[in-house]
């Protein structure tokens, strides 16, 4: 049977975490990161995953209320966690649009040394001038060039990672970068940090097939997951790679109960907490691209059409780019709401739902294992709805059942993240 890979996503700013829950803590204080990471390590997870936010998002000209506090610097957090964990992989999201290869390569090799070979880089791109205003280059990079720069960025960084073979001497030149010199750190314990990729577009899938060790997807149900899994695995041969060289790890959450019925009831309550009336209107505005604050979230969808254009009222959110044809999507949403008699809030709850494992610990363990064995994924990047203590019950109840069934490690067998994922300590 396939072995399951699990990662713990520290959620940061979004509507997944229920910050109003009495058990919710801070996503700024270091103690939250420590609790989260040490629980994941106690459960023998592969790695801790940290997203990135480079500018507070805005909507209707105001800072989006869920983003009033940003996220601490990735490398600062991961370096701190390296000191309080011993085996857990440490994955950070770093943008290839606004950074430089030498600086990023040096930071990841440093983290790999400090952690004893546990560093991972989630390579992301950014398209919007709004975020770019925080950086020297501004919004100079057209959307169609972002993956091209990301590929060249990773090529340049890989040249630096591998420069130990030539005594640190490196030279890399293309249309984006022209760098040469001597890298100032010795070989990384893993050879290179693990590379993750999170894009879902055609370009993102090709990028992952060519360059990544794992891909973070949103396709976690059986049919959707199997289609995505087969697609990205099929692409690997073009780049001389085997299916085992890319792990497919969809995002998912979970809700546990003493019975399946109790878990279902709790899951319904959690979704209502995650999508308040105000949040539902905010999400609807991102598609309609107009102020809808006067609408009742428990009422019907607007009868006016979305405003189409490049100027969006939501700034800094990648999700607005998913609405390629707002008019067509609005029609689809209206038809769905009418067919199921959904209010605005109920529709948004349905449309923003992600894969959630709901049930007793035993049934959740079965659900996870069934999807992995059916090649819908190689595991999951889990995000709890309570931060930082949301993994405690999962670690104590679901993980032991997976271990009893022989599909998840009882202990770490190697020191590096590469050994957790691929069974080899380094390249």
Image: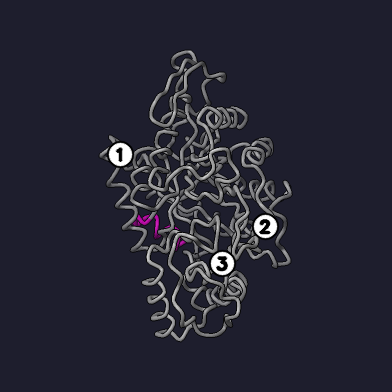
N-terminal of the pair, mark 3 or mark 2, is 3
Where residue 386 appears, as percent x and y from the top left, is: 64, 61
Is 44 situated left or right of 308 in this image? right
Q: In the image, is residue 25 above or below residue 84?
A: below
Spatial CA span between label 3 and label 2: 13 Å
Is 224 situated left or right of 134 in this image? left
| Magenta part of the chain | 366-376
Marks 2 and 1: CB-CB under 8 Å? no
Where residue 201 appears, as percent x and y from the top left, is: 37, 52
Where residue 293 appears, as percent x and y from the top left, is: 60, 76
Which residue is drawn at the image coordinates 41% and 30% (left, top)?
155
**Crowdedness near tag 1: few (<14), some (14–19) or many (≥20) residues, C-alpha within 10 Å:** some
Based on the picture, tell me whether residue 367 belongs to the magenta stretch.
yes
User: Which residue lies under the disc numbered 2?
Assistant: 389
Q: Is mark 2 on a helix, strand or loop?
A: helix
Where residue 311 appears, as percent x and y from the top left, is: 49, 60
Spatial CA span between label 2 and label 1: 38 Å
User: Which residue lies under the disc numbered 3?
Assistant: 255
Which residue is drawn at the image coordinates 48% and 73% (left, top)?
350
Q: In the image, is residue 339 above or below residue 32?
A: below
Based on the picture, tell me whether residue 59 belongs to the magenta stretch.
no
Q: Main secondary structure of the magenta part?
A: helix
């Amino acid at each position: 049977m396939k072995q399951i890979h699990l990662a713990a996503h520290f959620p940061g700013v979004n509507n997944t975490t229920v910050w109003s829950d009495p058990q919710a803590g801070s996503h700024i204080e270091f103690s939250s990161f420590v609790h989260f990471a040490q629980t994941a390590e106690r459960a023998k997870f592969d790695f801790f995953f940290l997203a990135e936010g480079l500018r507070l998002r805005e909507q209707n000209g105001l800072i989006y209320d869920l983003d009033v506090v940003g996220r601490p610097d990735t490398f600062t957090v991961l370096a701190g966690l390296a000191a309080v964990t011993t085996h857990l992989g440490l994955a950070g999201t770093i943008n290839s649009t606004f950074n430089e290869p030498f600086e990023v390569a040096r930071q990841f090799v440093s983290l790999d040394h400090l952690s004893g070979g546990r560093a991972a880089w989630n390579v992301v791109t950014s398209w919007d001038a709004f975020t770019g205003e925080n950086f020297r280059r501004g919004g100079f990079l057209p959307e169609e060039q972002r993956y091209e720069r990301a590929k060249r960025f990773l090529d340049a960084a890989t040249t630096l990672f591998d420069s130990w073979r030539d005594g640190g001497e490196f030279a890399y030149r293309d249309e984006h970068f022209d760098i040469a010199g001597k890298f100032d750190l010795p070989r990384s314990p893993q050879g290179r940090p693990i590379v993750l990729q999170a894009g879902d577009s055609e370009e993102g899938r090709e990028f992952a097939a060519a360059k990544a060790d794992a891909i973070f997807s949103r396709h976690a149900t059986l049919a959707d997951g199997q289609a995505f899994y087969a697609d990205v695995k099929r692409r690997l041969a073009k780049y001389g790679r085997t299916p085992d060289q890319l792990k497919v790890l969809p995002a998912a959450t979970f809700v546990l109960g003493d019975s399946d019925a109790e878990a279902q009831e709790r899951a319904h309550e959690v979704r209502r907490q995650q999508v308040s009336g105000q949040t539902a209107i905010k999400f609807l505005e991102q598609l309609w691209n107009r102020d809808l604050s006067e609408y009742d979230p428990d009422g019907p969808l607007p009868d006016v059409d979305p405003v189409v254009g490049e100027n969006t009222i939501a700034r800094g959110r990648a999700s607005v780019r998913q609405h390629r044809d707002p008019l067509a999507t609005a029609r689809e949403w209206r038809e769905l709401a009418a067919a199921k008699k959904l209010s605005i809030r109920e529709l948004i709850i349905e449309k923003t739902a992600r894969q959630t494992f709901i049930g007793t610990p035993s049934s959740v363990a079965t659900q996870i294992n069934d999807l992995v064995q059916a090649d819908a994924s190689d595991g999951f990047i889990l995000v709890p709805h309570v931060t930082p203590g949301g993994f405690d019950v999962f670690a104590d109840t679901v993980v032991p059942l997976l271990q009893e069934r022989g599909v998840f490690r009882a202990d770490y067998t190697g020191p590096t993240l590469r050994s957790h994922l691929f069974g080899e300590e380094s390249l």
